[in-house]
Amino acid sequence: MKLKSVYLGITALAFVVGMASCSHEPIIPEFPALSFSKDVQPIIVGSCTQSGCHDGGSGNEAFSLLTYTDVARHVKGKDAKNSKIYLSITGSGEDIMPRPPQAPLSDESIKTIYLWIIQGAKNN
């Protein structure tokens, strides 16, 4: 009887540990809050609007990325992996951006955009 109690206790502990490890929430590193205007917008302007693709005047007004409002339409705050911009810059979506011959974003730029999104994609 005592052995059965120990077995049930171990089984219950294993279940709790297993369920706790199945978390699908992103781990948000301890970084200072990223700023749209100081950290994210310069990346987008330098890579997305400079090429004439998402500047609002190239016939691609439906996907202009000049302002926070423009960018926010393509971002799901705290959910980078379901945000169109993140999927595009990582090549996980339908299209990879920026398109060749323009160079892809650096890993550091992608990380900055990812962290900004999972921090809530605030207009700060």
Image (spheres, rainbow, N blue to C red):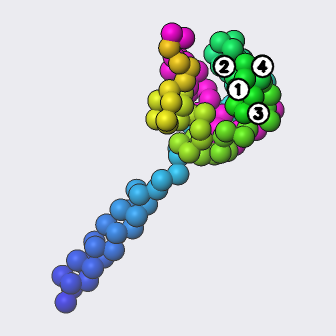
Tell me if label 1 and label 2 are in contact, CB under 8 Å.
Answer: yes
Query: Which element is circle 4 on?
Result: loop
Amino acid bearing label 3: Asp
Which sits earlier in the primary sequence, circle 2 or circle 3? 2
Q: Spatial distance from mark 4 to mark 1, Cα to Cα?
A: 7 Å
**Side (left or right) of 110 relative to 5:** right
Highlighted range, magenta: 101-124
Tell me if label 2 and label 3 are in contact, CB under 8 Å.
Answer: no
**Side (left or right) of 95 relative to 37:** left
Tell me if label 4 and label 2 are in contact, CB under 8 Å.
Answer: no
Residue at image mark 3:
70
Q: Position of residue 71 (x, y in %)?
A: 72, 33
Residue at image mark 2:
53
**Side (left or right) of 95 relative to 83:** left
Q: Spatial distance from mark 2 to mark 3, Cα to Cα?
A: 13 Å
Residue at image mark 1:
60
